[in-house]
Amino acid sequence: MKIHVSLQENSYDIETGNGLLTHLPDYIDLNRKVMIVTDAGVPAQYAQTVADRCLEPVIETLAVGEDSKSLQGFTRLEESLLTHDFSRKDLVVAVGGGVVGDLAGFAAACYMRGIDFVNIPTTVLSQVDSSIGGKCAINFCGVKNIVGAFYQPKAVIIDHDVLKTLPRRHVANGLVEAIKMAATFDAALFEEIERAKELSDLYPVIARAIDLKRKVVEEDEKETGLRKVLNFGHTLGHGVEAACMPALLHGECVALGMLPMCAPSVRTRLCDLLRKWDLHTAYDFDTDLAMDAIRHDKKGNSGSVTTVYVEQIGAYEMRESDYDSLKEALLTIQGS
């Protein structure tokens, strides 16, 4: 299935299906130097499958985790591109989750003021969310995604087969982003997620969630309006993440962050769905540490934060929240 993202000169296709890695030359030009960025947590055969189809491959394997999405990780990739004499005609390919995609995309955006970038996300989280929309970044001085750019890929390849090696926890972690999209935009999709029982049930969910995000990105590429709705769960979730890393995964934190930002009836359905996938509906964390992160979040403005609130499934509203009310919201998900 092909999903076209229409952004004038930055347009590209998202290809979804099974077995796409073995047919990459059908979708992208690999007849050039290609840096393949992956990490040690991704099965090595995925990057090697890409390399075997490239004219001049260079594989860079990073350490697992957010620490790689740093100035040091960025410097490593830039040095490798320079050492291997990459030109503006060459290509960077990310093969991994959100950390790999964010870092590789930012490295591609900056090298020689921008070379081609292709994203091959290997987790549910990155397939549904971070690979779509062109946001790439690194963490800096303890602040998540604070240094980055909007840089659209030349293509995104969504191969469902790579998800078969994911543990259930990581499947659930990524599913949160689809839940977020459905809760704010599509009640029917939310019901479909409620019915899903196993990974294969999620393939059409992933495609529909991607198409929803595609529509949002087309309307608001640089996050000046509608795209801010995608922050549902993230304002509080980023704070929880800062207080709970590495015990909790990103999607697990976003799941917690959604719960205080919705009506009671919505929260009940969300809790039922999260429990079905063994996701937390409460967690013990340092609320002061979480608030420090929220205050440094890029969405903060003059003592208030624009938040997304869901009154009913499939609809949303934007609200201005002060820091005291956000701390009170955090307390509602505090527990074990």
Image (spheres, grey):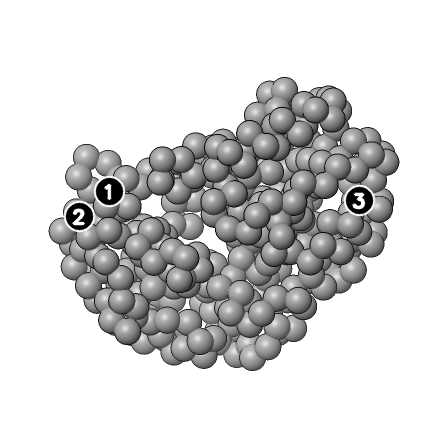
- Residue identifier under label 1: 295
Which label's residue is closer to the chain start, 1 or 3? 3
Is the C-beta separation of discs 1 and 2 under 8 Å?
A: yes
**Distance (Cα) linking label 1 and label 2:** 8 Å
Left/right placement of residue 234 relative to residue 333 reads right
Q: Secondary structure at mark 3?
A: helix
Q: Position of residue 200 (x, y in %)?
A: 65, 73
Label 2: element kind: helix
| Mark-to-mark CA distance, 2 and 3 | 48 Å
Specify whether residue 131 is in view.
no
Q: Quadrant of the N terminus?
A: bottom right
Amino acid at dot 3: Ala
Q: Residue at x 33, y 38 (%)?
A: 298
Is 268 placed left or right of 186 in the picture? left
- Residue at the left extreme, as displayed: 324
Q: Looking at the picture, does residue 74 appear above or below residue 306?
A: above
Give the side of residue 164 with respect to residue 269, left or right.
Answer: right
User: Which quadrant would residue 299 be assigned to in this image?
Assistant: top left
Q: Which residue is mark 2?
A: 323
Q: Which residue is mark 3?
A: 51
Residue drawn at x 31%, y 41% as measured from the top left = 297
Q: Residues within 10 Å of mark 2 (few under 14, many from 20)?
A: some
